[in-house]
Image (cartoon, rainbow, N blue to C red):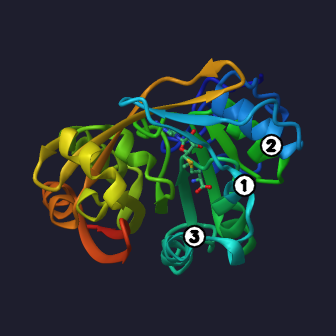
């Protein structure tokens, strides 16, 4: 894999693939090795070659088949709330001081590029990042222009963006409210003042009845629950993920201590999308 090691601009470099590098030859850096179960699952699904049904395993022993077809769906087929999230980003303005007049968007946990493909098609300059090398490999195969392997909890070397997007609750892998708050502060460093951050969250107070006893056993505080699970595919397990679930009130409390303000919340059952605005400096 070819990686430039020096930042080509003062602001914004990610493994040498920063938003200001769009005209460089980084497409030489294509061969991302598929080393994770999630990535192998995505790659095999994209090729119609799933070796076995993938499964999610919760820490209480509950197992469910992992359905990943929706990661490959087109915009019109998405869940309404996913469209709401992406629509909120589609409407952002490009910073007037940019030489380019199109909005720059950071897709955090881009998966196989579902939301990136939509944003690209409406003219955004999108950088997608994902911790899964396999997902990034598939994303590139699907025609996404700029995708790279990165942990969204270390975003400080990219930016500035007009907007950042999280669809799939992966920012909640922060696991605790303190770590989530720290992530929001870090993201404020990569989104310009006045910019937008949109992400989805699961609300434990609206969980379906069949999950009530799990919610009660994993309750951290009123309106705060953690769910721990991992993916298994074809004999391989990915690491455990601890997902933070927050009621809207608890979410607002976390945001209150950050450079963001909550400008909108859209709920659909047990999940909501929050639209945050970066406060001016
Ligand atoms: C539920 S999928 C959603 C994918 C995509 N956003 C979509 O809506 O189609 C969650 C994605 O987040 C990625 N992810 C999880 N934790 C991450 C982290 N710490 N940093 C970057 N990506 C992460 C996973 O690899 C996976 O691709």
Query: Residue extending furthest bottom?
Result: 91
Residue 162 against residue 154 in the figure, above or below: below
- Reading the image, the residue beneath label 2 is 45
Left or right, residue 244 beside residue 192: left
Q: Position of residue 113 (x, y in %)?
A: 69, 53
Tell me: is circle 1 under 8 Å from ligand 1: no
Do we see residue 26 in this rendering? no
Quarter of the rendering containing residue 133: top right
20 to the left or right of 106:
right
Front-most of 199 and 79?
A: 79
Quadrant housing the C terminus: bottom left
Residue corresponding to mark 3? 103
Q: CA distance from mark 1 to mark 3?
A: 29 Å
Note whether ligand 1 is within 8 Å of mark 3: no
Residue pointed to by mark 1: 69
Within 10 Å of disc 2 (Cα), the crowding (few <14, some 14-19, many 20+) is some
Give the farthest residue toward the top: 235
């Amino acid at each position: 894999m070819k990686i430039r090691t020096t930042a080509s601009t003062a602001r914004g470099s990610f493994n040498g693939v920063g938003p200001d590098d769009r005209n460089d030859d980084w497409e030489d850096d294509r061969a991302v090795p598929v080393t994770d179960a999630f990535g192998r699952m995505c790659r095999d699904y994209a090729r119609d070659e799933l070796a076995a049904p993938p499964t999610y395993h919760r820490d209480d022993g509950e197992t469910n088949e992992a359905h990943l077809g929706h990661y490959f769906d087109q915009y019109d087929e998405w869940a309404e709330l996913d469209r709401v999230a992406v629509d909120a980003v589609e409407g952002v303005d490009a910073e007037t001081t940019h030489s380019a007049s199109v909005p720059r968007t950071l897709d955090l946990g881009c998966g196989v590029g579902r939301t990136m493909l939509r944003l690209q098609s409406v003219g955004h300059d999108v950088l997608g990042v994902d911790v899964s090398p396999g997902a990034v490999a598939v994303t590139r195969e699907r025609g996404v222009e700029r995708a790279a392997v990165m942990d969204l909890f270390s975003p400080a070397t990219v930016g500035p963006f007009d907007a950042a997007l999280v669809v799939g609750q992966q920012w909640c892998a922060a696991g605790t409210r303190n770590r989530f708050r720290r992530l929001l502060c870090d993201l404020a460093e990569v989104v310009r003042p006045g910019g937008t951050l949109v992400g989805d969250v699961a609300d434990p107070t609206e969980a379906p009845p069949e999950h009530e006893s799990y919610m009660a056993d994993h309750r951290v505080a009123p309106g705060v629950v953690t769910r721990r699970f991992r993916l298994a595919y074809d004999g391989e397990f990915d690491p455990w993920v601890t997902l933070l679930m927050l009621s809207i009130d608890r979410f607002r409390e976390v945001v209150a201590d950050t450079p963001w303000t909550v400008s909108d919340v859209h709920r659909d059952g047990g999940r909501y999308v929050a639209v945050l605005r970066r406060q001016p400096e």
